[in-house]
Amino acid sequence: MKAFETVLDSGWFIMGNHLSTFEKQFAEYCDAKHCIGVANGLDALILIIEAYKELGLMKNGDEIIVPSNTYIASILAISKAGLTPVLCEPNINDYLIDPTLIEACITSKTKAILPVHLYGKMCNMDAINSLAKKYNLKVIEDCAQSQGAIYNGKKSGNAADASGFSFYPGKNLGALGDAGAVTTNDTDLAEIIKALRNYGSHKKYENLYQGVNSRLDEVQAAILSVKLASLDSDNQKRRSIAKYYIDNLKNEKIILPSTIQQDIINDNSHVWHVFVLRTSDRVAFQNHLTLQGVQTVIHYPIPPHKQPAYSFLNKNSYPISELIHNQIISIPISPVITEEECNIVCKAVNSY
Ligand SMILES: *Cc1c(COP(=O)(O)O)cnc(C)c1O
């Protein structure tokens, strides 16, 4: 309320001190040199690609490799920027892009790999970054679900050439509406994105690029600064709920998230944006949970290559992705869920 009133009383609502403060705080939080606030996560990814085009490193028709089981926005960003998404299958164990399958997707047109830290778990960035180095590709991380995650000492937002964040209200760090950001250590890229989000202009009424209006407003920036302070403790609460579920969910018909590193509480590479189970008869399982008063969501029911929006991909076959989309179901997880509520969820799952 105090943050909101401060903005209201200031009478300054776009591109002010609250935005520059949040950008500084979030860059620092991610160990990145630059943070540029934008209007949402989709724009963050689009503007990264657009900026690479302005730098002459990418052009229309070039290809970017992206996981076949991601949220549609990762793929939309590529096609909206005029490039072609090339879908790569995930690993069935962790549902993340499988680095061993990326090489086969590389062609003479490939310019980047766009790994998605889906469900809050960071991808194998060592393998992805070394592959990118070998083929001279950029790596663009989709960090929309992984705010605060750390892979091998690298923060999500500092584990690639450029990183796109969403602060949609339901994300681990959420605003009170739409918001997003780009982080990067590339100063040239950052300068172009700063202009692109504001009509392509560094200086009022002077336009260097054909930009867009994709700014992060002062109210959202001020709220994000308040909430950033508790992101780590919120993520820690999510980890303890995940541990509770993994310790207490016992049903042979249910596949739990793979936790190769069994120490869930100390595994910083996962911030448990959602808790995803897998089962062969999802409809019956979902009905059972609904009757027990447990709400579930499917992230996501239709794979991108089966969407009418991507008819040129409809005939392609991605069997691992299709299996995942047919079997996954998410049970409640959030920093505000109580142990009592977790217990209700466990009883409901175990009695199926
Ligand atoms: C939420 C999300 C986005 C898009 O973010 P918006 O702020 O809704 O535009 C992109 N990628 C992934 C993986 C997401 O979960």
Image (cartoon, helix red, strand yellow):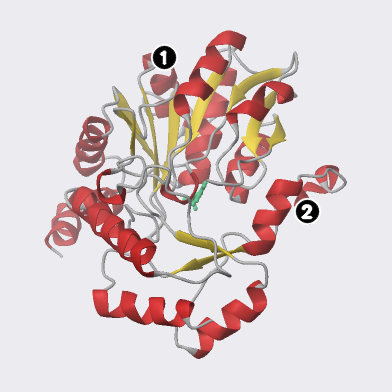
User: In x, y percent, where is residue 301?
Assistant: 66, 63
> Which picture quadrant has residue 151?
top left
User: In x, y percent, where is residue 268?
Assistant: 30, 41
Judge by depth and name the residue closer to the eye, 193 or 12: 193
**Above or below, 290 relative to 115:** below
- The quarter of the picture where the N terminus appears is bottom left
Label 1 vs label 2: CA separation? 37 Å
Q: Residue at x 43, y 40 (%)?
A: 143
> Which picture quadrant has residue 206?
top left
Judge by depth and name the residue closer to the eye, 275 or 222: 275
- The quarter of the picture where the C terminus appears is bottom right
Q: Residue at x 34, y 44 (%)?
A: 147
Q: Secondary structure at mark 1?
A: helix
Closer to the observer: label 1 or label 2? 2
Is the CB of the residue bearing disc 1 within 8 angstroms of ligand 1?
no
> Given the current orientation, which residue lies at the most extreme bottom position?
291
Return the residue at label 1: 188
Q: Secondary structure at mark 2?
A: helix
Q: Is residue 244 shown left or right of residue 186? A: left
Residue 165 visible: yes
- Type of amino acid at the residue the image marks with label 2: Lys
Badges 1 and 2: C-beta atoms under 8 Å apart? no
- Type of amino acid at the residue the image marks with label 1: Asp
